[in-house]
Each structure stands twice: as structure tokens, then as C-alpha cells.
Image (cartoon, coloured by chain):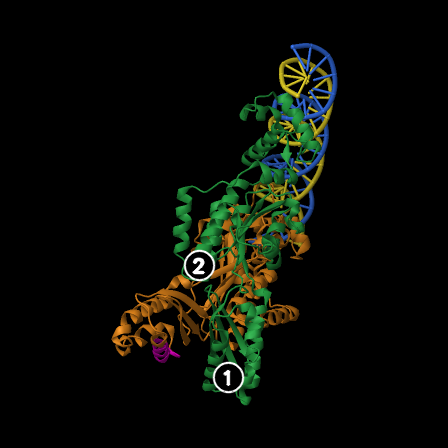
Chain colours: A orange, B green, C yellow, D blue
Amino acid sequence: MLDDRKLAVLRAIVEDYVSTNEPVGSKALAERHGLGVSPATIRNDMAVLEEQGYITQPHTSAGRVPTDKGYRLFVDRLSTIKPLSAAERRAIETFLNGAYDLDDVVSRTVRLLAQLTRQVAVVQYPSLSRSSVRHVELVPVAEKRLLLVLITNTGRVEQRVIEIPADVSEESVSKLRALLNSCLDGCLLAEAPTAVADLPEQVPPDDRPVAATVLSVLLETLVDKHEEKVVFGGAANLAHVDFSQSLRDVLEALEEQVVLMRLLGEVGDSSSLTVRIGTENQHERLRSTSVVAAGYGVGDQALARLGVLGPTRMDYPSTMGAVRAVARYVGQILAGS
Amino acid sequence: MLDDRKLAVLRAIVEDYVSTNEPVGSKALAERHGLGVSPATIRNDMAVLEEQGYITQPHTSAGRVPTDKGYRLFVDRLSTIKPLSAAERRAIETFLNGAYDLDDVVSRTVRLLAQLTRQVAVVQYPSLSRSSVRHVELVPVAEKRLLLVLITNTGRVEQRVIEIPADVSEESVSKLRALLNSCLDGCLLAEAPTAVADLPEQVPPDDRPVAATVLSVLLETLVDKHEEKVVFGGAANLAHVDFSQSLRDVLEALEEQVVLMRLLGEVGDSSSLTVRIGTENQHERLRSTSVVAAGYGVGDQALARLGVLGPTRMDYPSTMGAVRAVARYVGQILAGS
DNA sequence: CTTGGCACTCGGGGGGAAGGAGTGCCAGTA
DNA sequence: TACTGGCACTCCTTCCCCCCGAGTGCCAAG
């Protein structure tokens, strides 16, 4: 259907359009890409490519621009991921190594990705479900109020204020804390509900109402998918892009947690690098943007995802290289801490 | 210097310009504001106002636009803060009451402020220095690695991973934890350094190197001003504004923590409501924006600040009302938890 | 001090016209 | 059959010019 030269023409169109942001014509193509054929021949090829929906022209007397389908073919078959330079890799490493807690890792990752790709970076906090419990802390902060702090092996700290039905002694709290820790220590969060199933029986009858409240909040915290926080940064990089959609639409979409979550896609295994181009995005207001995302995690199991969002007219090979590299390094950092 | 009518004219110019976004002329003023004088008279007044630098005209045959100095006079003498409607107040209350931890309070506040004012919201996390220690937790997370968790009475949880020189027993950690808590419990963070001064002496000689490391990280965490985190949201509200500066400049400035910090200004007492207009902002790239900020906190002492950023052409009375109201409610929420 | 009148200024918008990039088609050639 | 050069055509972009009108400053009169 499409011979090698037609594919080469498509590749050249994508590359030229990405770097110049102007519809590319047959003459410029023939000159700059040494295809060894005349502009007329290229025009014929372009006519075929257009007929098949890979490129389009904004208006009759203009050059061609890739369609979403064209970018898709380019990403799938015509390009290879561009590895980062040694300098860039060193920069990532030193930048991420300076982080001192999970929040810091995430916020540094966002800034790093945004800077590296000159696009909007999106990073999801590591999921709780595959972490295990390192420690549970229970602290009275006021009458009838306890603070529950949960520390996981991924360095994540979750906190919740709990309203309890009756005041309890410092001693009861200590006992409950000890019990919780003995039940949960080292246990996967996903298995926590079963692990604490018989805990209430071990509590003195007087403290059972309190224990029940604490437990329900604890389980809610563990299960609560809302806690899958996503942050973004680098919005400034959108300013100089002209979307067919309004910039406002894109920014609004980015400020909705739910949209951000969907954007990154399902958490699969950590080696996955996915590209979603233009209309492939479910969200209306992001029809003119592309997303490059990857899972990251410890070992080969992904804890969460990160990626960047930019105009469909983006440098896919470089962007994919940057996203992949950052995902790997973040995984290493998390494994180490 | 400026009689009452001239002030009324200035007020009318500001109000009209804010609502229409178009230079306002003498005729429209005379008609819409019932000043009881003819356009010619208003023109004379406008000439004086322009001479004194309160208004300016974009080009010769256009109406007048307030200058930064004009807005300043308007804010200081010509307007009163507009209280929120009962419905808005209820909305704030119910929205903020749903928050379940400090992060959630802050992120809800950002969204609330942005929505209420249709501008960019900026919120600083409550400062540590005026909080007191509720609890210190120390958990071994790996060999030669401890996790330090600090819980304050404002519900803030700070965490740091500590690399220690030698591995220590679970028992030593417990002892150290107990010691830390007995020294620090209830003590103001600002006074922590003196409170722990003689702690090393109470530690068994073998554990002193570890204790010293932990202490140094702890004090660093307390003192570290970098921890004064600031977040913003509502960037989408900037999209439809046309700045004289480029939008990109403004967004870039917003993504720098340091700039955000400076933006909100010094933490004073919590009743302070400050307005910084256009060039009054120190930052180059924010010359065409205004900031309305207020302190918030428990009682009359401010823990931190929050505010909004928008074009100098903003509805100051309403914005000030919203910022003040939100600041108060956040203070109440923090006091309650 | 205020007012109506009047000449003046200047930005914005509409309407061609020229320029040019790029195309599709066709006939000729290897 | 595949490629090439030539050519007419399309239509976007840019520029210029002109006109319109909003708004002004000034002045003389009330």
C-alpha cells in the first residue's frame, strides 16, 4: 500500500513540520531531505498519503500537515526513541538524588520533566495498593480526636484526623497502636483488611468503639482511590503553543484530578511507554494535545505513571526518550529510599 | 488638590474600565454615572487626573484608563471591601469543612479561592515556626536509615529520611524516640534547638553518633525556610486575560517557589489585607499583575498567607472580600482540627 | 466654574491589488 | 510503468489606502 519512499516522505513531513511549525511543501521536501526524486514525484506521493488520511492541507494552496493518523504511523513505525545525552542523564540523576522525601521526589520530577521536554509534566503519586505497611502511628491531638499516621515502605506518609466517640487514655492509645503495628507490620496494604479482621477482639471492651472507628478510617484510607494524587507543572510551556482548542480549555482540563488520572492511563507494567495522540484522548478539551506516558516503579512492577502533555505537533522521539529515562530514574530513587 | 467630583470621576473610570475592559470616555461617564455635569466638565477633570498621573490614554483619540497610581487611590480611598453573599459564605464553609488533612485543606482552599475570584489563587502552607510539637516519630526503614516524622499541633506532618552512620537496634531507636518526645512535647518549634541542647548527654555513648545525626536533621527540618511551601491554582483563569507582558512570563514566575513566596509578602498579624498593584510588585515579570493577599491563622496571629493574583484591571472590592473571607474560614478550620 | 460648539487626531476596519507558495494535471521521456 | 518538467490555477497573506467615528482639547459664552 505504502512503499518505502512514501513512508520516507511522511517521516520527512512530520519532522519538518515539527521543527518549523509550518505546512511543508513538495519543493522544500525534495531539497532538504535528499530523497533523490523531483518535487513532482513527491507531490504524487503526497496525494496518495492525503487520500489515505495521513496528511492534510490547511487550505488549497498550502503545504501538508500530518493528521493524528499520520503521527500515529510515525510513532509506531517511522521513528526510534531518542536516548538522552550523557549530560542530560547526569542532570537527571543529580537533580533527583537531592530529594529528601516523597513529596520532594514528585515535585522535582515534575519540574525535571517539564524542563527536559519543554512541555507540561504530569506525575502520579506512587499507588498505595502495592506498598506494604512500615509503621502505624496514633497520636492524640485533642479531646476525642486522634491523628492516624501511616508510613509505607515506599516512603509515603498518610495522615488522617479521626473523630472518636469517647475520650480515651494515653495508655489505651498506646495499646491500640501496638496492636495495630503487630497486625499490620510488613503487610501489603491490599491485604490489610483481612490482617486486622480479628483485631477488635483483642481490645478491652471499653475501648472497642474507639478501635472500631480507628479501623474504619484506616481501611478507608487504604482503599480510598481518591488518594491517588496527580500533580502537574510546566504550564508556562503551553503559552507559546497555539492550540486549535483554546488554551483555557487545556488548562482547565489539567486542573481536574479526574482528567489528569485518565490522561496517564492504566497502570500496567513499568516498562510500558504509551503515546496517545490528539483525538485518541478521551477528553473533549484535549483533542488537540498528545500525551506521552510511562509507568514507573520498583523492579518491574509499576507503582504509578508519569508523562508529559503537549501539542500533537511534538518531537515524539525526544519526548519519549526523556519520559522513559525519567521514569527509570524515579523508579531507582524510590527503590533506594 | 482633588475635589470630591474628581474623585468620583476616578472611581467611575475604574469601575467602568474594570467591567468593560475598554478605555472610558467622557460622554459615557456622564451618561452612566449621573454625576450631574456635562461631558465637557468631566473632560476638564480628566485632564487634571491625567496630569497628576492617575489615569492615562492608550492613544490620543481614546478614552482613559487608570494607571497603577489610579488603582492605588481607588483601593485606598474610593472603595469599600465588598462582603460575600450569604450563599457564597455557606459555600466556603461547606467546601472547607469537607477537608480531612492539611494537604486537603490547602488544596481545597486554592480551588475555592480560584473559583470565587476567577483568578489565580496562591496559598502558603502554615509556617512551622509558630507551631508546637505534638509528637515525634522515629522509624527504622532500612539498614542505616531512619524515617523521622514530626507532627505539629497545626496538623502538619513533616518527614525526612535520615542516613545514619551505624545500624542501631530497635531498642535504641525506641529510647531515642522517647527521649525526643519528652524533650520536645508541646514545645514551640522555634524553641526546639534549646530544648534538645542537653539531649545527647542522656543517650548511651554507643548511640551518640546516631543521635547527633538525627538531631541535626531534626533541627534542619525545623529551621529550614525552604519548607515554607506555596502552591497555586486556577491558571486557566489567566488564559482569557491579555497581559501587556506575555502570558508565558506570568506562568513562569508562578512556577518559582521563591517568587510565589515574595508575592504574598511578609507574614504579619492575621487581620492584614494587602494589595500590591502592578509595578508595586518587585518581580519584573509580574509588572502587569496585582496581588491581593491576607494572613490567616489561629487567633490573631498569622501562620501564613494566601491571596490571589490577577490583572491590574481587577474588581478589587469583590476580590478583597473573597480573600478576607476565605482567610478567616481557613483560620477557623485550622483552629478546629 | 460650567457648558456647548468645533476642529483635530488617530486607531480600527473594510476593500482591493499584488505577491507568492504550493498544488494538480498533463504530456513527454527513460 | 514510473518519473519529470512545465504550466495554469488557487487562495492565503500582506500591504496600502481610505474612510469612519470616538474621543479629545480648546475656546468663547453663559
| Residue B266 rendering spot, x and y as whole percentages | 60, 55
Identify residue type, mark 1. Answer: Glu
Q: Quick check: can you spot residue B150?
A: yes
Q: Would residue A179 be counted in the magenta stretch?
A: yes
Residue B111, relative to residue B18: is it above or below? below
Whether residues under marks 1 and 2 lie with C-beta atoms below 8 angstroms apart, the answer is no
Q: Which residue is mark 2?
A: B335
Q: Secondary structure at mark 2?
A: helix
Instruction: Describe residue A209's horizontal placement relative to residue B261 as left or right.
Output: left
Q: Would residue B263 be counted in the magenta stretch?
A: no
Give the residue displayed 59% in from the left and 21% down from the top: B37
Pick the residue in front: B153 or D20. B153
Give the residue displayed 45% in from the left and 76% down from the top: A153
Please state the chain letter of the residue tagged with numbered disc 1 in the rendered image: B
Please state the chain letter of the residue tagged with numbered disc 2 in the rendered image: B
| Residue A41 rendering spot, x and y as whole percentages | 61, 51
Q: Secondary structure at mark 1?
A: loop
Identify residue type, mark 2. Answer: Ala
- Secondary structure mainly formed by the magenta segment: helix
Residue A68, relative to residue B174: is it above or below? above
Q: Which residue is mark 1?
A: B143
Q: Residues within 10 Å of mark 1 (few under 14, many from 20)?
A: few
Q: Nearer the viewer, mark 1 or mark 2?
A: 2
Pick the residue in front: B98 or B293. B293
Residue A103, relative to residue B137: is it above or below? above
Instruction: Describe residue B133's horizontal placement relative to residue D29 as left or right.
Output: left
What is the magenta range?
A: A174-186
Pick the residue in front: A43 or A231. A231
Give the residue displayed 64% in from the left and 21% down from the top: B40
Q: Quadrant of the C terminus of chain B?
A: bottom left
| Residue B263 rendering spot, x and y as whole percentages | 60, 53
Q: Quick check: can you spot residue A262?
A: no
